[in-house]
Structure formats: C-alpha cells, structure tokens
Image (cartoon, rainbow, N blue to C red):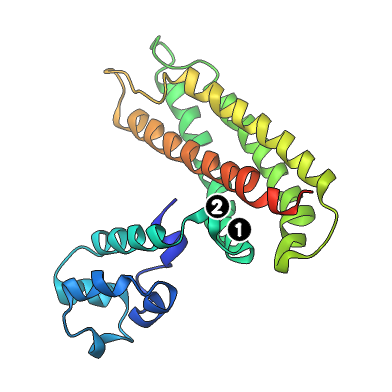
Amino acid sequence: MNYQDILGCYHDTTVAQLINQCPQTVDILCKYVPDLDAHHQATVEAVASIADINPDQLCQELFDTVMEQTPIETLDTDVLLELILRGYDVGHVEQLSKLHRLARKIEAVHRTNPDVPKGITLAIKKLERSLTAHLEQENAHVLKRMLHEQPLNLEAPIAQMNEEHSLIKLQLRKLRQMTQSYSAPESACRSWQRFYRELKALDFRLSERIYLERDVLFPRFQL
C-alpha cells in the first residue's frame, strides 16, 4: 500500500485534513514546523518545503502514524471500498499492459539468452485478461453493492470472486517461479531489471488487494 492511498496526494492534502483524520499526526508535523497553528491550511508539500525535507519522507512518517492508530482491518467499510477502488483498479490494468509490451521486447531482444523466462509475455497477457474481466465483474456486481453496507445477499457473487482471486494468485505464483522471485540475472540489461522490479511491485499490490477483499472486506457481508 502506498501512503497516497491513505493520505491522498501531498500536493492537495492540507494539515487541517490530516489532523482531522488522525490527531496524532500533530506530533510529526510539529516536529518539523513548531508554529503549526499558522499553517493549518497549508498542504503537506508546503510543510515539507518549509521544513526543507523530502515530501516523501514526511508522508511516510505521517502514514506510519496513521496506520498505527487505525489498522487497515478496522477501517469503515465505505472507506475501505474507496481505498480499494481508488488505489488499485486502473493502475493495475494499465501497468499490466505496459509490462506486457516490455516483456515482449525483452523476449525478442534476448531470445538467445537462456536466462530469459520463456513464455513470460504470454503469462502476463493471460494475467491481464483475467484481471480485466475480474475487475469488471467485481465492481459491477459486488463492490458497488457494498457501498453504505447495503443489506443484500452477496454470498454467491463473493464466492465467485474468491474463486477468481485464487486463479489470479496461481498466475502470480507462476510468474514468481518463472523469474526466480523476480531476481534479474547478471546478464540482464536495464530494461530487464526494470521489468522485474515493476513486476514484483505489481505482484505485491495485487496480493495486497486480494487480502483486503477476501480477508477483510468480504467477511463483513458473509453470514
């Protein structure tokens, strides 16, 4: 999970919004800007600029504080749904499309290299198809019906979504096996190394989403 998923974009999120979300963030903010009362309408980016620190560093400290106070498992259902829908869907599909093109390039350029995982382009394309179809069905028939905790019978569609989750997890496991857990060989070029890094990050994000849905969100709507 990225800090943007919880805090929002540091260009837009204000000090007042952060404090309202989690009062304990005051301690972090005051550490860098002692006269915080004069900057309640300032954005996190502005606070970082005043303190002369990297915005990402400040956001990470704020994120850690928020998550200490509010574990993700205890988030309100609508907040959790917004987090899942805003933080995962579009980015996952777009990233898979880019990774598919990169995989095709690497398999073509390094086709004589025995370290290239044969068939990885096809494996990524299959994952992209599975994920695209899954997200369309899940958003239309499950997640949107959960908004405001609507008391609807979701047992059957949830069971179907969990079956699809299991398929996606198998596809991710296959990618890990093909890439030696995303460990680029010494012969790998920069594009190949980047490909593995981005594929590993995507694996983490997808696995995280599946956990949030299957283990945190869905049980709230099952008998």
Residue 207 has which mark? none
Q: Amino acid at mark 2?
A: Tyr
Mark 1 belongs to which amino acid? Leu
Q: Nearer the viewer, residue 59 or 24?
A: 24
Residue at the spot of label 1: 85
Instruction: Tell me, yes or no, whether the two marked residues, 2 and 1, touch with CB atoms within 8 Å.
Output: yes
Compared with 5, 203 (above or below) is above
**Would you say 88 lies left or right of 189 here?**
right
User: What residue sits 71% from the left and 69% below the top?
Assistant: 148
When asked about the image quadrant of residue 124, the answer is top right
Residue shown at the point (55%, 46%) measured from the top left:
92
Image mark count? 2
On the image, which quarter does residue 126 sit in?
A: top right
Image spot of residue 127 (x, y percent): 62, 33
Q: In this orientation, which residue lies closer to the viewer: 139 or 219?
A: 219
Q: Position of residue 18 (x, y in %)?
A: 38, 75
Q: Secondary structure at mark 2?
A: loop
Q: Is residue 134 left or right of residue 207?
A: right
Report how far apart the C-alphas of labels 2 and 1 lie in the structure: 6 Å
Answer yes or no: is residue 12 visible. no
Decide: is 38 above or below 109. below
Across and down, in percent, residue 41 comes to 33, 86
- Mark 2 lies on residue: 88
Classify residue 56 as left or right of residue 153. Answer: left
Label 1 Cα neighbours within 10 Å, binned few <14 / some 14-19 / many ≥20? some
Closer-to-camera residue (17/149): 149
61 relative to 161 in the view: left or right: left
